[in-house]
Image (tube, rainbow, N blue to C red):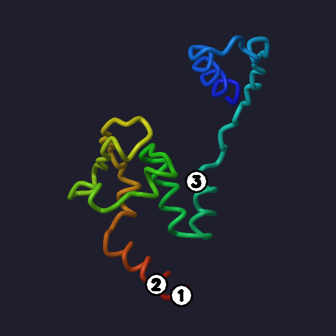
């Protein structure tokens, strides 16, 4: 990655009159591929996460069930992103990695946890306890 950045700068410098390219002979070392093994028992893992932290559990099932990216897409969700019946999540292009508008269906097992009143109550209780 560093070589790519330097190469772009040096190419511009050569166009402006630099006589040679000092990184021309440097070869890029390729990264080794790494196989990520799937989790065998997802239900057990989700139960353990639910016992640890309910909000983390909600993030996990939104990521797993709706195929949302955990950092930006799930973290920045608001109730305005959901349809009235909570069956779809609508994200504009500036809110996701691809830059395209996304309309994602919400599975029934995720929808059962998405009750505005219960989430607001849980969030309020956590704020009081901390």
Asked if the residue at tag 2 contacts the one at tag 1, i.e. Cβ–Cβ closer than 8 Å, the answer is yes
Q: Nearer the viewer, residue 12 or 100?
A: 12
- Report, in whole angstroms, how far the alpha carbon at label 3 lies from the one at label 2: 26 Å
Element on which disc 3 rests: helix
Quarter of the image that includes the C terminus: bottom right
Element on which disc 2 rests: helix
Q: Nearer the viewer, residue 102 or 51?
A: 102
- Report, in whole angstroms, how far the alpha carbon at label 1 lies from the one at label 2: 6 Å
Residue labelled with disc 1: 129
- Direction from residue 43 to residue 18 in the image, left or right: right
Residue 43 circle label: 3
**What residue is shown at x 75% (from left), y 19% (from top)?**
28
Residue 45 locus on image (x, y percent): 63, 56
Residue labelled with disc 2: 125
Nearer the N terminus, badge 3 or badge 2?
Answer: 3
- Direction from residue 45 to residue 121 in the image, left or right: left
């Amino acid at each position: 990655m560093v070589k790519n950045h330097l190469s772009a700068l040096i190419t511009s410098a050569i166009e402006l009159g630099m006589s040679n390219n000092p990184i021309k002979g440097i070869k890029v070392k390729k990264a080794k591929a790494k196989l990520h093994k799937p989790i065998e028992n997802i239900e057990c893992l989700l139960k353990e996460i639910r016992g640890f932290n309910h909000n983390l559990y909600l993030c996990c099932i939104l990521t797993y069930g709706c195929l949302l990216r955990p950092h930006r897409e799930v973290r920045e969700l608001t109730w305005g992103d959901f349809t009235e019946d909570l069956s779809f999540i609508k994200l504009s292009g500036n809110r996701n990695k691809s830059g395209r508008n996304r309309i994602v269906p919400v599975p029934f097992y995720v929808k059962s946890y998405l009750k505005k009143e219960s989430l607001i109550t849980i969030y309020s209780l956590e704020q009081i306890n901390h």
